[in-house]
Image (cartoon, helix red, strand yellow):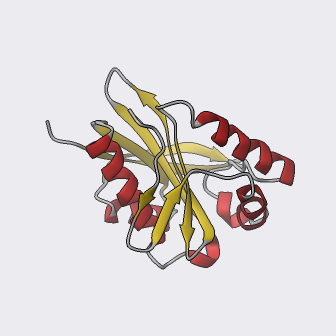
Amino acid sequence: MSGTVQLRTERLILRKHRIEDAKVLHRNFGMDPVMYEYSGWNPYATEQMAEETVRRFINSYEDSRFYGWAAEYEGGLIGTVGAYDYDQEDSSIEIGCSIERKSWGKGFAGEAVTAVLKYLTEHEGISLVRAWCAAENTGSRKVMEKAGMVCTGTEAGALLIEGRKHDRMDYQFAVSK
């Protein structure tokens, strides 16, 4: 396994994080409640948290099973893509993607997820890539479906985010053997 390597798409560069990314992630992700509305997870809430998160990413690049990308468009950081919880036994991993709100609706998330799915399955030999989203998060559902992921089920009330229950939709991208 090679871990995080630079990937290029038609419009994006998916690269390793740099410490200067922390300020952008705090400003464009951590300070915008819409960015974590359906995850309840905000590792960029403060400047210190953003810097600690990015440092953890940078330190993890030594691990050949760590996958964490900064998505760059025209020289600016617009998002992140990560794959985590690799299970060697069933050759599976989970993926997540986040694109800053001002870049929504331009196809960047689908482009990034498609590139990472291709890399994980074709180059890293991972057979199954999983993802999930809240059922109300139509943007995330469209991204996963556009990237070729298939909904494998919906679990009613499975997500509890800030005291509110959401249905959880599970997706997967499987490589035929």
Q: How many marks?
A: 0
Determine if residue 168 is in view.
no
Q: Quadrant of residue 62?
A: top right
Query: Where 89 falls versus 84 (above or below)?
Result: above
Front residue of 42 and 114:
114
- Is 71 situated left or right of 41 in this image? left
Q: Position of residue 136 (x, y in %)?
A: 51, 62
> Which residue is located at x 37 percent, y 58 percent?
115
| 123 w.r.t. 63: above or below | below
Seen from this angle, which residue lies furthest left?
Answer: 177
Horizontal placement of 26 versus 75: left or right? right
Residue 105 is left or right of residue 20, and the answer is left
Front position in the image: 42 or 19: 19
> Which quadrant is the N terminus positioned in?
top left
Residue closest to the eye, 125 or 161:
125
| Rendering quarter of residue 31 | bottom right
Percent position of residue 11, x then y: 44, 74
Q: Nearer the viewer, residue 106 or 32?
A: 106
Residue drawn at x 72%, y 50% as measured from the top left: 42
Q: Is residue 54 visible?
A: yes
The residue under the point 68% across, 49% down is: 40
Position of 111 compared to 167: left or right?
Answer: left
Q: Residue at x 77, y 50 (%)?
A: 50
Counting from the top left corner in percent of width and height, residue 92 is at 36, 33
Q: Quadrant of the C terminus?
A: top left
108 shown above or below 151: below
Q: Residue furthest top?
A: 89
Placement of 140 over or under 165, stated as above or below = below
Q: Where is residue 61 drawn, in percent x and y?
A: 57, 37
